[in-house]
Every structure is written in C-alpha cells, then in structure tokens.
Amino acid sequence: MSNIETNTDASRILFIDSKDGENTALSNQLTTKYKVKLQDPIVVPSHHTLLLSLHRLNVPRTFYNFQHARNCGLEVIFLSFDGTNSTGSGWASTNLSRPPYLSFELDEGNYDAVSLMNRITTRINDYLTTGEAPTERQPHGTISLSVAQKNKYKLSMNYNRNTLKYEWAMDLVDESVVPTDGGIMMVFRWKTGELYGSEQTTYSDYQDTSIRQEVGFISNKWIDGAIFDFWLRYSPNATATSRLWSYGYGTLPSTYPITADWGLASGELREKTNLSQTQIDNDRYYFRGNDTPSGTPLSNNNYLSAVDVSYHTQNLYLHTSITQHSVLDTRIGGRFSDILARIPVDVDSGGEIVVSPSDGSVHKLILKVREITEIEVRLTDLNDKLIDTNGLDWTFSLEFDFIVQPQVGVKKDKRETIEEKKYEYFLKKTGKLEELKRFQEQRNHEKLPNV
C-alpha cells in the first residue's frame, strides 16, 4: 500500500531509449552519448530520499573489440642487429634520416587471438617482403626499405593455448639463403611510438592507443609495471649453432640517425644461442616472456601477460549526470564518479547484452538531488571511450524508490541520561505532574522527531 508522496512502497520507472535523446557526441553516428529532458520532472519531497538502481538494460553486441582511436595502432622500426640504422652493412631506409619504419591500424572488427596474430604478421611481413609501407598513417611519410634488405627476414608468432600467450621470434624467409648484412633488430614502439605510443603528445586523441594490452604487454606485467618498447634481434649464420636470437626492452631514442649501440645498451631479457638444428626445429628460439634463468635452484621471471583481445570491452560502464556522489572509482584515484553500473559483456558478437530487473536491483544508490529535469547519459569502455554500436540504438530503464529520510541522531552521554532520570524521579516525588508531563513530551519528541 502506498500513500501519495509520503509513505511510498511503489517505485517510479523511467524508460530511456537512445533514439529519443539529444545527441551530444562529437559524431551523430554515435548513439552512446546523449541527454534526455523530462517534461514531468521527478521531484523529491523534503522529508524523503531517493534511491536509484538500474532496472533493465539492453545493448546490442554490435560494437568491436578493436576500434579506431582506442586500440588499433601498431608501430615498428627495423634496425641492424646492433641497434643502429647506419648505412653500409647496417639497415638503412630510402630516407636516411630515419630507420625503416611501419605504422598502421588494424581494420576495426572482432578478432580472436589467432586472427589477431595472423593480421599482425601479415602486415609486418608484407613490409619486410616488399619494402613499401602504405602511405596512410605514416607520420613522416613513407619510409621504404633499401633493396638490400627486402625479402630476407620475417616475423614469426605462435599462440600457445596452454599459456594463453603469444610467442615471438625473427626468422629467415628462406633458411637456405643466409644474409651477410649482420642481422636485424625489430622494435615494437609501445612507449615511444610517434602516433600510438604512450608518450606521444602531438595527437592527443590517439594517446596510448596501441594494441599492446591486447597482445600481452599489459603494464602491470611487462617489466614490473613499466611501459617499455619491446625488441627482437636475430643474427643469421650458415651454421645452426652460431645463430643468435635475443629479446629485450628499452626506450628508443628520438634522434636520428641512430648511431649509438642502443640495442645492446637496452635491457636484454633473454638470449638464445648455441642451439642445435633439432632445437631450432622445435622452436626453442621463440621468446615466451621469460628472462634468463638465474639463482639456485634456477628460476626466471615471465613478463608477458595473457593475450586478452577484449581488454577494453570486457565490461561496459553506464554513466549518468545524476550519479556523481554515490560511486567511487579507483581509475580516477578513488574519487566520486558518475558511473551508475558496470555491465559485464558475456555474450558473443551479434547477441544482446541484457541486465534484468533482478540483476539491476542488487545495488541501489542514494541520490543527493531534490529535482530531476534532465539526465545526461554515456556508455563507455574501460578507458572511458564511447562505445560505437555501429548505428544501433539501445535502451535502459531506471528505478526510483522514495524512502523516508533517515534521521541520524547523536547518542546521549551516559551522564546526561542519569541526570534526566534523577530529574524525572524528583518531579514524581514532589508531585509536579504538569512539569513531568512536559518533560516526557519533550523527550518523546527527541526520539521520534517526524511523529
């Protein structure tokens, strides 16, 4: 039973459809940032407090786990084995002021671990084979390989389903043709990328939009929580036991040409040499994230995280302008956030993400507003970037519960309680009934102020 605006057990439900809102995103194609205005405002009486919960939500799973300006970028540089881009026997580009350089974005879409691996190796090996980079997304223009380095090396990758990690290596295109140019060093520019790296500032919209988190270089694992570039080196030789593979990390210099021994000066994690042909055939030269074993008994660290192609979209975050004082978020230093709900993505692409009333009512927020006339809404990923549902609208509903505003009383001091009992006894003993009645009424009012 409910009494209008006083004793209310009933709830108010607000149904919201993104197509009915006023789009406030930078692109009209996005349906995940908008505001709605209420012709009939929700007014909270002074003696009530409003509880808010997510009642229901339906979002089509048409967004991609790899999206432009979120996690599609990859930048690599190719150097000679010693980490320089000097001319002569070393690696050199047609633009001698810079080393051979490739920057590209994955096509937007939903990739699994294997298809992502194949896409990476295909794009990189196409450059190593032809020596030509696509003209788009090259910050310094196309920087091609010199003829001497074309079609000699390739990037090899495996996906280990037991460890859920990628394995990396440089290899020869044709093992019967051993180059004499001193080998190759390949650098994945997780940190120093000029377009997608974590430190670039020229294109702020692309800050740290590389694929590193998805492919095993999440910062809490890679080199104990730091972000570094990742490099692979390979020195070929006609004799199997003389071939050399090594893997490490560092921060690529920003000045060119690179003449210092940058590769050797950076942190080397693992070196593979003196491998027999049998060990090479068994892929013992791959980098699986482990550094060189040390100590007694031997032990080593593994710096690669598991491959997570849904790193940014494992959960969706529903934000509203009326929920700014009830949720704390560690991503912003534990301060108050406007997040209303975190929604797990537990359906495959093409399905629909659903929050039912029983799910949404578990967590209720106390709102510090007295009137609601407008609500701003955002649906984002882990890094607070808007989800792109590819043009489809989505719906959700909010439940508002009115409750009597709780009274927070200060517990009386024990001494004050004793004095009141003494005074009440005194009034009874002396027969001052009128004074006793007023005293008891005053005390009851303090206990039940709304009665």
Image (cartoon, helix red, strand yellow):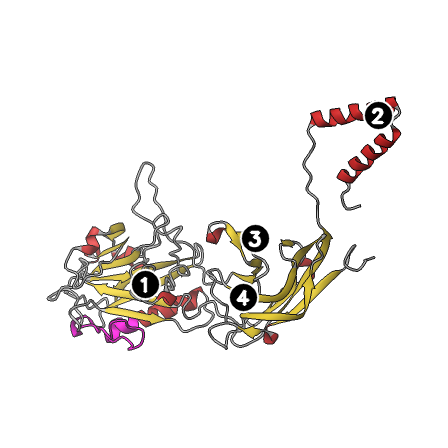
Counting residues from the start of the chain, the first of labels 4 and 3 encountered is 3
Label 4 and label 2: CA atoms lie apart by 64 Å
- The first of marks 1 and 3 along the sequence is 1
SS at mark 1 in the image: loop
Disc 4 vs disc 3: Cβ atoms closer than 8 Å? no
In the picture of the structure, the residue carrying the numbered disc 4 is 378
Q: In the rendered image of this protein, does residue 433 appear above or below residue 366?
A: above
Residue, x 50% and y 77% (percent of image)? 29
Query: Does label 3 or label 2 sit earlier along the sequence?
Result: 3
Callout in the foreground (1, 2): 2
Q: CA separation, marks 3 and 2?
A: 52 Å
Disc on the earlier residue, 1 or 2: 1
Residue type, mark 3 in image: Val
Tell me the residue that label 1 is attached to: 201
Identify the mark at residue 339; answer none if there is no mark.
Answer: none
Range of residues picked out in magenta = 125-150
Task: Classify residue 125 by image quadrant.
Answer: bottom left
In the picture shown, does residue 225 fall above or below 132? above
Distance from the alpha carbon under mark 1 to that under mark 3: 31 Å
Residue 174: image quadrant is bottom left
Residue 123: image location, x then y, percent: 33, 72
Point out the tag, 4 or 2, that comes first from the N-terminus.
Answer: 4
Q: Is residue 167 left or right of residue 396?
A: left
Residue named by callout 3: 327
